[in-house]
Image (cartoon, coloured by chain):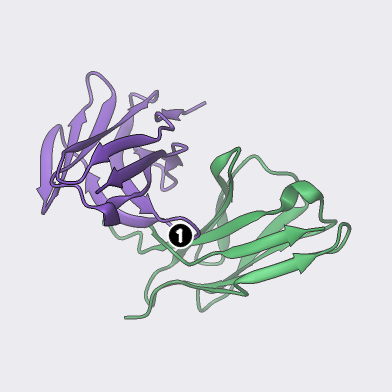
Chain colours: A green, B purple
């Protein structure tokens, strides 16, 4: 079956703009988590959605938000972009039925200039 | 604050040797442990998970868990240059669906 799909793969934005990233989980998976990965901070958890509800949230400012749709697809939005938001944004899906291993998408590389 | 610590490396081993990657964690309530491999410019790929104390083997990979000492390790036997990557340790506490990731150990397998 198809894996986790993230779009777009690459983005270049200007400071102050906003951006929306998309993630389609593995079919049947209801949990979607978002992570930010930078060389300095490693993989940091942003938030997790399950059945259209935000179930967990990491320690990021309110400029970072997300949502999940009824088909489990998720979007992440970052407003008022800052240079420090440049990172690889990864989405992971899991089934949440016991074997809760997370599977990652290919990521979206965001560059803020 | 739940912490997962890994030596950043790089760990350099010759082809054919055993590579040993270690990870320690702070939360004694941790119940699930994962190893991901991440090639440069790619996303993390799950290679092993372990829930119980002891060893778990899968091909050339062996995960070892010692909850009393709060460490988990990954052994790669017969290391190949294609194993060169960053290995991320992830730990999940009971009742939480969100794993905490270490910063990863860079492994270099040289011919």
Outermost residue to the front? B111
Front residue of B36/A49: it is: B36
Residue at image position (41%, 48%) is B97
Q: Which residue is mark 1?
A: B43
> In the image, is A64 to the left or to the right of B76?
right
Q: Give the percent coordinates (x, y) of residue A112.
A: 78, 58
Q: Is residue B60 left or right of residue B101?
A: left
At mark 1, the secondary structure is: loop
Residue at point 59% right, 38% down? A41
User: On what subunit does the disc labeled 1 rest?
Assistant: B
Can residue B103 be seen? yes
Of residues B25 and A70, which is closer to you in this image?
B25
Up-down relation of residue A73 to residue A97 (above or below)? below
Determine whether, in the image, residue A87 is placed left or right of residue B108.
right
Q: Report which quarter residue B29 is drawn in.
A: top left
Q: Mark yes or no: residue B90 visible.
A: no
Residue at 13 percent across and 50 percent down: it is: B60
Where is residue B85? Give x, y as percent.
Answer: 37, 50
Q: Position of residue B34 (x, y in %)?
A: 30, 45
Residue located 45% across and 39% down the image: B100
Residue in the foreground of this view, choosing between B16 and B69: B16
Q: Residue furthest top?
A: B69
- How many labels, in total? 1
Q: Going by the picture, which residue comes out furthest to the right?
A: A16
Crowding around mark 1 (Cα neighbors within 10 Å: few <14, some 14 to 19, many 20+) is many
State the image quarter where residue A13 is shown. bottom right
Compared to residue B27, the image places residue A40 above or below, namely below
Residue B1 x/y as whole percent: 52, 26
Foreground residue, B59 or A100? B59
């Amino acid at each position: 079956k198809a894996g986790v799909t993230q779009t777009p793969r690459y983005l270049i934005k200007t400071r102050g703009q906003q951006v929306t990233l998309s993630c389609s989980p593995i079919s049947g998976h209801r949990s979607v988590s978002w992570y930010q990965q930078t060389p300095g901070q490693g993989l940091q958890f942003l938030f997790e959605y399950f059945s259209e509800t935000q179930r967990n949230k990491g320690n990021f400012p309110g400029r970072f938000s997300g949502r999940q749709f009824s088909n489990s697809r998720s979007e992440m939005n970052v407003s008022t972009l800052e240079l420090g938001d440049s990172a690889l944004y990864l989405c992971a899906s899991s089934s949440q039925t016991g074997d809760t291993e997370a599977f990652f998408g290919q990521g979206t590389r965001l560059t803020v200039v | 604050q739940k912490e997962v610590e890994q030596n950043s490396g790089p760990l350099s081993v010759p082809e054919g040797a055993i590579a040993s990657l270690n990870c320690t964690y702070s939360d004694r309530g941790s119940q699930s442990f994962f190893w991901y491999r991440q090639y440069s410019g790619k996303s993390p790929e799950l290679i092993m998970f372990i829930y119980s104390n002891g060893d778990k083997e899968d091909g050339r990979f062996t995960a070892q868990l010692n909850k009393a000492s709060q460490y988990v390790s990954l052994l790669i036997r017969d290391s190949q240059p294609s194993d060169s990557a960053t290995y991320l340790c992830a730990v999940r506490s009971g009742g939480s669906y969100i794993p905490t990731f270490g910063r990863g150990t860079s492994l270099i397998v040289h011919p």
